[in-house]
Amino acid sequence: MVVMDRYIRWLYKLMGEQPFVLIMDVHKSHNVITNFAEANGIQIIKVPANGTGTYQPLDKKVFGVLKSRLCKKESYLSVEKEAEGHPHTYKYKIMHERTIFVWEHLDPHLIKSAWEIPGL
């Protein structure tokens, strides 16, 4: 099974096994529409290479702030140190928890403003 097919199946479970729309650029690794996606109502929209920032407002405005705050909060090395002696997946648990924490503390106006697209 190709990586994108596995990714789409994972997203499908994450989305409560409901149809959804996935926006991807046309990078060759994304150049797949799986039978699974079609059979489960998953719509894949392809945008020009490096165009997700234009077509996905959260990419353009919110994720930069999220990443910046994550970097300020803790360094990757501190995650590695905290995960030492645990299974390798433990560091992803730590990173997930920190990402959720930072996300929940973003100003709701920042997220709303990402969708205020000039001309629409």
Image: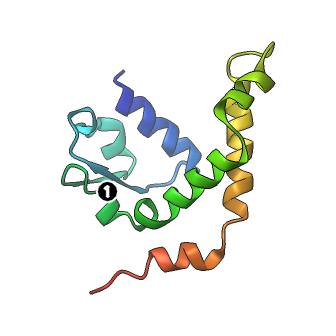
The residue at 55%/72% (across/down) is: 111
The residue at 72%/30% (across/down) is: 79
Which of the 4 quarters of the picture holds residue 76? top right
Q: Position of residue 55 (x, y in %)?
A: 31, 64
Question: Above or below — where is 115 with respect to 80?
Answer: below
The image's colouring method is rainbow
The residue at 43%/56% (across/down) is: 20
Q: Is residue 84 left or right of residue 62?
A: right
Query: In the displayed image of the protein, which residue is found farthest to the top?
Result: 85
Q: Position of residue 24 (x, y in %)?
A: 31, 49
Question: Above or below — where is 119 with respect to 66?
Answer: below
In terms of depth relative to the viewer, which is nearer, 60 or 33?
Answer: 60
The residue at 25%/51% (across/down) is: 50
Crowding at dot 1, Cα within 10 Å, few <14 / some 14-19 / many 20+, comes out as: some
Question: Above or below — where is 18 with respect to 71?
Answer: below
Q: Position of residue 44 (x, y in %)?
A: 30, 51
* Residue behind mark 1: 52
Q: Quadrant of the N terminus?
A: top left
Q: Is residue 73 left or right of residue 40?
A: right
Question: Above or below — where is 71 with respect to 105?
Answer: above
Q: Position of residue 81 (x, y in %)?
A: 76, 22
Q: Quadrant of the C terminus?
A: bottom left
Query: In the displayed image of the protein, which residue is found farthest to the bottom?
Result: 119
| Label 1: which secondary element | helix
Q: How many marks?
A: 1
Query: What's the amino acid at mark 1?
Result: Thr
In terms of depth relative to the viewer, which is nearer, 70 or 17?
Answer: 70
In terms of depth relative to the viewer, which is nearer, 32 or 102?
Answer: 102
